[in-house]
Amino acid sequence: MRFPVFLAAVLLGLAFPSCERQRNPANPAMGGENGVESPDLEEQADLEETIAALTGGAAEQAEAGILTRVLNGAGLPPDLAVRLEAAVAESPAFVLDLLACLEGDPFLRRLVDKSHPLPEDYEPEDLVELVPGSYEVNRRGLLLRRPAAEALERMAVAARTDGVVLAASSAYRSYNYQVEVYGRNVREMGQVVADRESARPGYSQHQMGLVVDFGSIDDSFAQTRAGRWILEHGSRFGWSLSFPDGYEEATGYRWESWHYRYVGEDLSAFIDLWFGGIQQYALQFIHAWQGANWEADAWEGASWEGPGDS
Ligand SMILES: [Zn+2]
């Protein structure tokens, strides 16, 4: 589903009366001298109505404080949820950025983590083979979805300009290939260690064809020129670090300095600006938003049962 962004802008204009129209001192409901509502609360209520209208939600959803419910239901750290709620009350910037992220390819914003698998038979239709040139490949036959491959090319060209050569080591993995990868990791490391850095089949972002593991695929990558360059510049090209240092509790995976997911430039900017660069939080928020609003997630169903269920 696509939102008409121009319509969003018009409606958001209506949602912020302090910008668009004068308060009427004779009308208490407008926050005049006898009014009981603070301007913040009034604007918050208006914004929630606007969001409900934009998303086809019912009026009662707006009354129930849909945004508050989504923020609370998204599993975000409480301080982040509070900050975002305040930001939304203050200006339409967050909602406009969100609407931009909700345009276009839904897989770019799809939450795939230890609780949200892909269907076993999901295979992207636009996989293309990576062609070394601007970047290197550490083995033949690596595949990515076309938009990700094109974004990798753009990023690699920019890296070359800075004298840095990127090397792709792993990209698309089919469900069946992930069966092998996960099985091998469990045999070599034991299940507990394997689950910290290897996804169970169906739960890997690699199955989306939107992920590249760069370089050595180990911790040494972070200290390489390529590792530092992507961390600093990758977001500009739509690439987002999936499992950052210190967020294992949120992502389910230990720090993986080499694993970048292509989310598109709108979403990577949204992640950086509003979610402190933590992809997991932004995708959880969008997932909760969609669940609360307009898109019944047809693929929802399977859930992570914890160690021992495979
Ligand atoms: Zn990876």
Image (cartoon, rainbow, N blue to C red):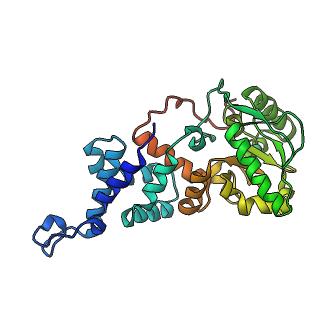
Measured as percent of width and height from the top left, residue 194 is found at: 78, 41
Q: Give the left or right position of residue 190, taking residue 261 as reference.
A: right
Residue placed most toward the observer, 54 or 45: 54
Instruction: Find the residue positioned furthest to the bottom.
Output: 33
Of residues 83 and 138, the one drawn nearer to the viewer in this rendering: 138
Is residue 95 rendered to the left or right of residue 255?
Answer: left
**For this rendering, which residue is in front, 108 or 42?**
108
Horizontal side of residue 297 vs 62, given as left or right? right
Please determine whether, in this image, residue 304 is positioned above or below residue 100. above
Q: How many marks?
A: 0
The residue sitting at 57% across, 44% down in the picture is 109
Q: For ligand 1, which image quadrant applies?
A: top right
Whether residue 297 can be seen here: yes
Please state if 67 lies on the left or on the right of 142 as rendered.
Answer: left
**Toward the viewer: 130 or 111?**
130
Quadrant assignment for the C terminus: top right
The residue at the point 53 percent across, 29 percent down is: 301
Residue 192 position (above or below residue 226): above
Residue at (65%, 25%) from the top-left corner? 120
Is residue 118 shown above or below 43?
above
Q: What percent of the width, then of the height, locates residue 106?
A: 55, 38
> Residue 210: horizontal and vertical position, in percent?
69, 41
- Percent coordinates x, y for residue 115 in the rendering: 59, 39
Q: Quadrant of residue 141?
A: top right
The N terminus is located in which quarter? top left
**Which residue is most to the top?**
121
Residue with the most extreme left position: 26
Residue 222 appears anywhere in the view: no
Q: Identify the residue shown where x is 79% and y is 29%.
A: 177
